[in-house]
Image (cartoon, rainbow, N blue to C red):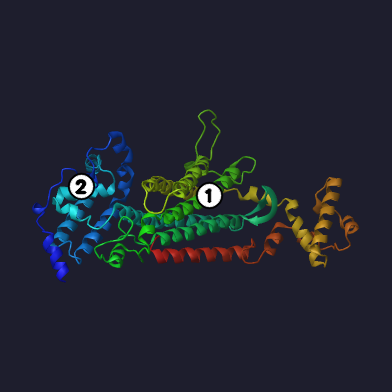
Amino acid sequence: MAERSRLKHQQPSDPGHMTERKDDRMWGGRFERAPNEDFARFQRSFGFDRRLLPYEIAVDRAWAKALEPIGIFTATEVKQTLAALEKISERAKTDSAWLETFGADAEDVHHFVEKALVQELGALGWKLHTGRSRNELVATDFRLFVIDAASEIQHVLEALLDAFLQQVKANLHAAMPGMTHMQHAQPILLSHFLLAHAEAFTRDIARLQHAAASADTCPMGSGALAGNSFAIDRPAIARELGFSRITANSLDAVSDRDFALDYLFALSGMATHLSRLAEDFVIFASQEFSYLVLPDEYSTGSSLMPQKKNPDCWELIRGKTGRITGALLGLLMTLKGLPTSYQRDLQEDKEALFAAHDQVLDMIAVATGAVASTRFNAERLQTAASNPALLATEAADYLVHQGIPFRQAHDIIGKVLREAERRNVSWTALPLEALKKISPAFEADFAKGLSVEAALAAKKVPGGTAPESVRAAIADLEGRLNKRVTKTGAKP
């Protein structure tokens, strides 16, 4: 208590008692000459890290409150500082011109806020930086951004999943040819195909949640690298900012960007899934497939050919995926050669991540609208699914039920197909006598089970394409989505 009283006495609350500085830089005292103008412009980051301003002010509020119990701030100074921070926050929200002009020579978001505080409070504005470093500040701001950004992306992903659910329900009975190696393989339900994409996006939500959990650690109190000398209450600051825990090592705290990598990895996986969806829809919209009709609202035409309707929304989503993956690889390359502790290279961690976040938001919004507006050609899909070649596996399964080992059954059906090719007829049209010459296991009931409906109904295991399995999958996805929406309070 005596130490707190001594510190308060040494730090008068009257800003007029403090020494005025001629240089508003946060580091200028050691230097005789001003920075080279080109270098000064080159090293500024306020142009993009101003996006962290709400988080910077939140951290400043928490820090101001934490400085009072250790005797750096008086109660009056805390009140004055908080009021000034609120004024800066409100002005930043409403006065973009002020951000441009006042921030023109700000090095970064931290420098900007300190300049604004000094403008409001005089020399008292300099006291807030007591015991802290920009190294820990930017790490804290950036973590708060990633936590919010992951939540924002999750909410729009839930809207995309809802669009899938609506299409799945609307096309529950439509069959289509499932493909492997881009070759027709077996009949499946269109709803089963759409649910496959939905499952990929639910995994993306899990990765977003992991990235947010990775960022949920507060570095404040780590100093530049060695910790804090003023017995600051780190857990209290973490609670004030909404973090669940504090970082364990001050050196690691200022250099760790794993949370940013986790977030960019989540975005990259999401973009890759969007790109795969885009590729499917581009192919399905071609005249050769004609599985779907592109919505006018998400298509463009040709400047030369009047008949064209181009899937530009999907092509752009597919194309922009490279930017997202590039952001992840760029940060990995930035980090790979850095020594332990903070290095200025880490200024390069934010710009590409901000851009990737914004791009993925746009990609998901467009994909959601396009999925919801697409009309599927059920008749064309059914015709393609009804190709007898897609039932060859069902024929082999028939022989298995007759007691023939599958490998032998596979070989027998291959001979049936070859005989049909020799006769230039569909293999399902071969007479029973011809089939029995190949294997006596064929009976009169063989042809009755060779239908799309029978093939679909047979795949009734959980996760299969049988109608009852797909209905169960719909209920399961709805349950998971509703659980997330209830937990987060968001609407898909």
Q: Amino acid at mark 2?
A: Lys
- Position above or below: 267 against 23: below
Q: Residue at x 81, y 63 (%)?
A: 399
Of labels 1 and 2, earlier in sequence is 2
User: Which residue carries the number 1 mark?
Assistant: 272
Q: Position of residue 315 (x, y in %)?
A: 53, 41
Q: Amino acid at mark 1?
A: Thr
Q: In the rendered view of the protein, which quadrant contains the N terminus?
A: bottom left
Q: Position of residue 101 (x, y in %)?
A: 22, 39
- Position above or below: 251 against 306: below
Q: Residue at x 53, y 31 (%)?
A: 306
User: Which residue carries the number 2 mark?
Assistant: 115
Question: Closer to the camera, 90 or 105?
Answer: 105
Q: CA distance from mark 1 to mark 2?
A: 43 Å
Question: Closer to the camera, 166 or 271?
Answer: 271
Helix, strand or loop under label 1: helix
Q: Position of residue 480 (x, y in %)?
A: 49, 65
The extreme top residue here reads 304
Question: Closer to the camera, 206 or 68?
Answer: 68
Give the class, few, some or many, for how many residues have Cα within 10 Å of label 1's Cα (few <14, many ≥20).
many
Give the class, few, some or many, for how many residues have Cα within 10 Å of label 2's Cα (few <14, many ≥20).
many
Q: Position of residue 458 (x, y in %)?
A: 70, 64
Helix, strand or loop under label 2: helix
Horizontal side, residue 480 vs residue 3: left or right: right
Q: Residue at x 19, y 58 (%)?
A: 82
Q: Which mark is residue 217?
A: none
Which of pointers 1 and 2 indicates the residue nearer the eye?
Answer: 2
